[in-house]
Amino acid sequence: MEEGATCAIGTLQRDVVRVVDGVEIWFGFSSNFRPPDADECKAAKKAAKKFGESFSRVEDGDEETASTEGVFTELLGFGVIFEATGEFFFLPHQKGSLDLAHRLDALISRCRVVTYHAQEVVQRALDVGVSKVEPSTANFVDCRVDAWLMNPDRAYDGGISEVSGCFEEVTKNGDASWDSATARLRADLALALRYYQRGSEIPRMQGISFARIVEAKIAVALGAMQHRGMCFDRHEANTQRAAANARVEELQNRARDVIGGVEINLSSAQQVGDVLYNQLKLPPPSAHAMKGAKSSHLSTSVDVLQQMKHPFAQIVLDHRGALKDRAMCDGYDKATVVNAEGHARIHTRWNNTSTATGRLSSSAPNVQQVGRGSMRNCFIAPPGRVLVAADYSQIELRVLAHLTEDERLISLFNEHSRTVDVFCAIWNAGRNLPIETPTEPGTRDIAKRTAYGIVYGQHATGLAEKLNCSKFEAQGYIAAFHRAFPRVQQWISRVIQTAERDGAVIIPFSGRHRPLPKIHSNVFSERSEAQRQAVNTVIQGSASDLIKTAMLRWCEATKAGEARAELVELVAQIHDELLFECEKDYVQEAVRVIRSCMEGALCLSVPTPVKISTGKSWGELVEIAIS
């Protein structure tokens, strides 16, 4: 094997469902190129239910086995095909043997690796004993990422056959059977190599070569995060599940008392709507609040209920929250895998192609949906360690200041953000008052919602709904912001004009682009949405580039020995926050490196400070001073 050779690597798994008494139903094969067949999966689940009421949990320390809603994929091995010779090898996985790990180590460290869904390949490689895959030096090409870069409004999660159109090729054997699993894997590996070769020739890829490299490295980093997982306290989850059940029952009783002893199913939107609008005679929601309603029934959405000043509406909201807490406890607990040390960990899937702006998301289960409540107490540090959270402050507004070059907004972040609250300062600036002027209660929230509404491309009608005020008042808040920071509106106009001219927008830091085919639509709502997407994509996409750069700087710092990788590990990315597990005695040293990596990620015209917090659990983090 020559240094710098190009090869394609993929995984092969068998798909099973397991029953309580140990019975396994094997229903097919899958790989990183092709997910388990949905119809076969459904049939296998039905068959499994004949043998038991529920599926068993993985608690045997086998980290090569992943579970999603009762479906397990057991690793059989890795396929490798070399570009120069076309030779194909299958490297079987034998539990307890290090031979596979040594071979993969050599391939990943010496070759350019072409694949589809790189983080899955990296996770599996680490699961079988590969010592480390360095994002800063690993040379991966992910044709799934390449396809997403060309068409970021699609996630390409359905398998390699989905990306063929991006590479101007129709896959004739895309639906070939799994009669010979290794033959199917070999064909997909060859397909990935062909897409890699075509990708370098496609004109659309020429301007995003830098983004192609960065996003592939991010995929490697995400694979390492998936392998590590997050430590989870199942005892705390059981406690919270019991509390949620008690809360559901209590709210059901309170609802019955409030509406005069009538029994009601609070989970039924139709019954809730009947009580709100027919029995209690509450005023119906606005036309905007009805947007997206699935039927002709008056809306019972969260936004609508929050506007209603009635105890019953609040009971419904609290009931939904309790049901969500219970479901989250169940979902996270079922997703845990108990490792060899006896610690329960959740190995969420980090998605790098699921949003057009480039922001990361997670699934199976989604840990980014955990709000700032007691549920976060279930995510803990293992013995001897603490969690360290590094959170960017107002990062999208800071990006907005940099992009728009608005002198007053830049000055606010450069000169005043350490002495006054940013949103109070924005409120005062909009009324031409001194920045330090005390504000009335509630005005900070108005300023915050207005500022972020502009970032997200929200119009006056939407802002009025969020603030529960008239459209006229909302227009006044938006106008005040633009009076204070006039270059913001000028920049927004330029972005929209560019999108109309080019049919797309470009994110300046990475060169990633997003086509906006409906920017010239004759339908006002479609054209307006495309304009909103144009502005939001540039801002959120830039913020996404910032935190991804910070992640890669962290990987480079650990490789260079600036931080000791065995003492501190990146385990999650939650929007604008990076979450680490760190040895208790190493926190101060780790924090200095984390702060340097994040605050120096990109050179902006405003600072990008991070707030550092530590704690035994994610829900008990306490901000610390950085020396």
Image (tube, helix red, strand yellow):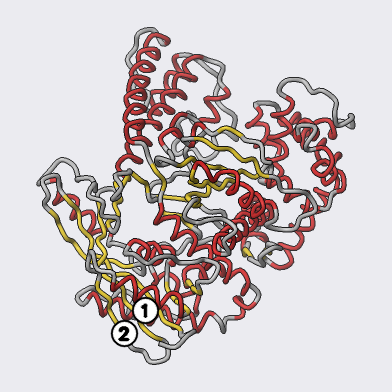
On the image, the x and y values in percent for residue 137 come to 53, 71
Circle 2/circle 1 CB separation < 8 Å: yes
On the image, the x and y values in percent for residue 115 come to 42, 73
Q: Nearer the viewer, residue 185 or 168?
A: 185
Q: CA distance from mark 2 to mark 1?
A: 9 Å
Residue 345 vertical position relative to residue 119 in the rendered view, above or below: above
Mark 2 secondary-structure assignment:
strand
The numbered mark at residue 112 is none
Work out which residue is located at the far front of the displayed protein and give it. Answer: 585
Task: Report crowding for label 1: few under 14, some 14 to 19, many 20 or more residues within 10 A (C-alpha).
Answer: many
Work out which residue is located at the far bottom of the displayed protein and give it. Answer: 85
465 displayed left or right of 409: left
Residue 146 vertical position relative to residue 579 in the rendered view, above or below: below
The quarter of the picture where the C terminus appears is top right
Amino acid type, residue under disc 2 in the picture? Phe
Q: Nearer the viewer, residue 210 or 338?
A: 338
Quadrant assignment, res 547: bottom right
Instruction: Tell me which numbered mark, 2 or 1, is placed earlier along the sequence.
Output: 2
Mark 1 secondary-structure assignment:
helix
Residue appearing at x 66%, y 46% in the figure: 456
Task: Report crowding for label 2: few under 14, some 14 to 19, many 20 or more residues within 10 A (C-alpha).
Answer: many
The quarter of the picture where the N terminus appears is bottom left
Quadrant assignment, res 6: bottom left
Residue 2 vertical position relative to residue 370 in the rendered view, above or below: below
Amino acid type, residue under disc 1 in the picture? Leu
Q: Nearer the viewer, residue 13 or 254?
A: 13
Between circles 2 and 1, the one closer to the viewer is 2
Residue of label 2:
88
Residue appearing at x 57%, y 84% in the figure: 201
Residue of label 1:
189
435 displayed left or right of 11: right
